[in-house]
Amino acid sequence: MIIHEGYENLNLIAPVATLGIFDGVHRGHMALLDCLVKSAQESKGESVVITFSPHPRLVLEQNNSNLSFLTTMEEKKVLLENAKIDHLIVIEFNNQFSKIPACDFIKDILVKKIGIKHLIIGYNHHFGKSGEGDFNTIRRCSEEFNFRVEQVQGYHTEEGTISSSSIREALLRGKLDNANRWLGYNYSVSGTVIEGRKIGRSIGFPTANIYPDSQYKLIPANGVYAVEVHLNEKAYPGMLSIGSNPTVNSDLRIRSIEVHILNFDNDIYGRKISVVFRKRLRNEKKFDNLEQLTRQMGHDKQETLRLLI
């Protein structure tokens, strides 16, 4: 996959394109992307995904403190490459860009700059100033500028239509199985290992504290999870705790992400690490003393080994 920062000086072959945020690149997105790749192959053209950075909500909404997303841009690039997309165009989203009317965006960027021949969009897609561009707008413009437009319906399951917002909600409510099923892969968080209070080491369960790569990366609900830990291109089983550690902390406003890597005791401070969420084991709980906490962590370890080994 070739990545383009912006839309100048492109030389695409009969581009078949789609555009959107694609947060999570989930199963619903994959249904659209599969259609995109197939259409490009049939027309002997190239598949093109157009996305925006930063996320438009970070630009348009005054209060960003509660915003969180399923994927960073780097994670999104990997997922799109795995979908066998030929080209990814990343357009800078700012206040000036947000004011471009939908028809001007189609004419000046999609047609003149990208040279679009076939546009495929999702079932509820809107773009342009104030979200005025919908399927009917695109269809009218396609007739004027001579490109084909196609709308793909949402990906439906027995539980409803899969969406990024429903997956975010599932993760925040501790419904990890649902989130992973709707994503089509296991959710992950990457970051840097930082120093903690070393309480885990004192009770025989040393943990690596993780500082996420992005402040807007969604962190699942508080609790204990069985995870795969990826470090130096190797994978290790681990049990991860998200929360305030109420047994040993009095300030419950401080939230941490700590992982105990099984059968591993190397110094990895400052190293990059990624954790893949395989199973939620239990809710966070306050124990009466460290002995009870240690006993429960032993049970958590056995359950993690049963699930992952």
Image (spheres, rainbow, N blue to C red):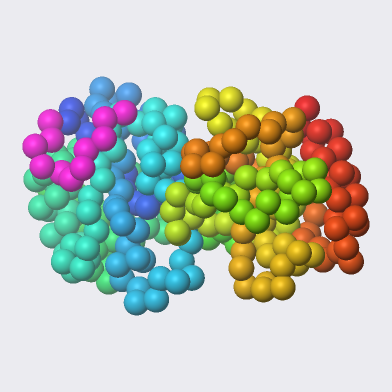
Residue furthest bottom in the image? 62
Main SS of the magenta part reads loop
Whether 42 is drawn above or below 98: the answer is above
Specify whether 104 is left or right of 252.
left
Q: Quadrant of the N terminus?
A: top left
Where residue 13 appears, as percent x and y from the top left, is 18, 28
Q: Is residue 174 visible?
A: no
Residue farthest along the front direction in this orientation: 202
* Position of residue 217 measured from the top left corner of the image (x, y, whole percent): 48, 55
The image quadrant that residue 96 belongs to is bottom left
Nearer the observer, 3 or 227: 227
Which image quarter: residue 115? top left
- Image quadrant in which the C terminus is located: top right
Q: How many badges with numbers are in the image?
A: 0
- Which residue is depicted at the point 32% across and 24% down? 41
Q: Is residue 90 magenta?
A: no
Q: Tell me the magenta residue range.
A: 1-11
Q: Position of residue 257 (x, y in %)?
A: 62, 54
Residue at 44 percent of width and 29 percent of height: 82
The x, y position of residue 113, in whole percent, is 11, 44
